[in-house]
Image: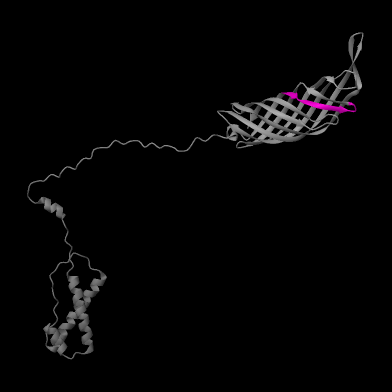
Amino acid sequence: MNSLINLMALRLHPIHLVLFIALVSSTNFGSVLSAQPVEAPISELQRKFLELEQRALRLSEEIAETTGTEPIQLIDRNESLAPVDIQSTAQDSYDALPGPEVEPLPMPEEPEEEVQPTVFTSEVNRVVATTQQRKGDYYLMPIIGLAVSTRTTYTDDSLDDDLQGKWGNSIGLSAGKRWDNWMVYGRVAYQHLEYENSSFKGLPGVSNRASGTEESYSLACGAGYSIPLVGGLSTYGGVGLGFGWRKNSVDLEYAITTGGKTTWHYDESGSSTESSMVFTYDFSLGLEYLFKNNYSVLLGYRLLGLTSNESFDGSFQHLVEFGLGLNF
């Protein structure tokens, strides 16, 4: 420190001041570098600082000779900056101290609880499958049946009386499309049945009787609703409209009594055969059962109405139908 004060007491040339600052800086860097182990390799940057430090020392000696002062000496801190390796942790050092060995306390054991299975209950009610899901989107069903007509009225000139229906038959084909429990269908059918009246009103004082037939071809379309019951059993109901071709014929006979014997003779003037296009309407209901794969059977009732045909009034037909169909 005295050397530093003596040096400052002199009025040095500015170049001397620059060299002094470089010397102090190199001294600090040199002290750091000298603290490194000898064995460590020296980098290029360290080598430059060491050369700069040697030059500063030589310059300090020259200035000291000129001014009669002492040269700058480097401080040897004699400190090692090498890291100290820790050989063991604090817990290992503590365990190495003499004393009784303490065993760790046993951990308390919790009793094992029996795991109960989780049971989930559903609050959703059972969903009933629709007719479409059970039987399919479409169906095709041939139908045969028995036909019974209530009556029809025949009117021609002085003739005006009812004809009572008898048993007949029918045959048809029905095809339809389902949406859930709803359905639409098309139906083509043929009906044939007979009429009779054993006391037909004809000419006054003459006994008459009449018999006749009715044939009809019908084409109709309709819609209905089906209700699933149990298993493959379901009930249905529907209504339809259409048109048809109706043909009616009637044969009249009159009685002649001779010698107590009555004979019947054909009345050609009173007999008639007429046909025309008519409108039809029907109401149906019944049961249908899906018995195997896509096959189902049907048992139903249909009320078929036909409008008038020339001299024949409108009529109703009761059809008891049986069908065997395919669902797809």
Check the image and tell me how it is coloured.
one colour
Q: Which is nearer the eye, 38 or 150?
A: 150
Q: Eyeballing the image, is 287 above or below 4?
A: above
User: Is 152 in the magenta?
Assistant: yes
Query: Which quarter of the rendered picture does the C terminus lie within?
Result: top right
Q: Eyeballing the image, is 91 above or below 152?
A: below
Residue at (23% x, 75% y) in the render = 49
User: Is 38 in the magenta?
Assistant: no
Query: Which quarter of the rendered picture does the N terminus lie within?
Result: bottom left
Left or right, 92 with reference to 113 = left
Left or right, 219 with reference to 180 = right
Q: Farthest top residue?
A: 259
Residue at (84% x, 27% y) in the render = 154
Q: Which is nearer the eye, 49 or 193?
A: 193
Left or right, 244 with reference to 88 = right
Question: Which quadrant holds residue 282?
Answer: top right
Residue 22 x, y percent position in the rendering: 22, 80
Residue at (19% x, 71% y) in the render = 32
Q: Farthest left residue?
A: 99
Question: Which quadrant holds residue 192?
Answer: top right
Question: Which quadrant holds residue 318?
Answer: top right
Dominant SS in magenta: strand
Residue at (17% x, 71% y) in the render = 34
Q: Is residue 64 visible?
A: no
Residue 111 x, y percent position in the rendering: 23, 38
Residue 26 x, y percent position in the rendering: 21, 77
Boundaries of the magenta span: 146-158
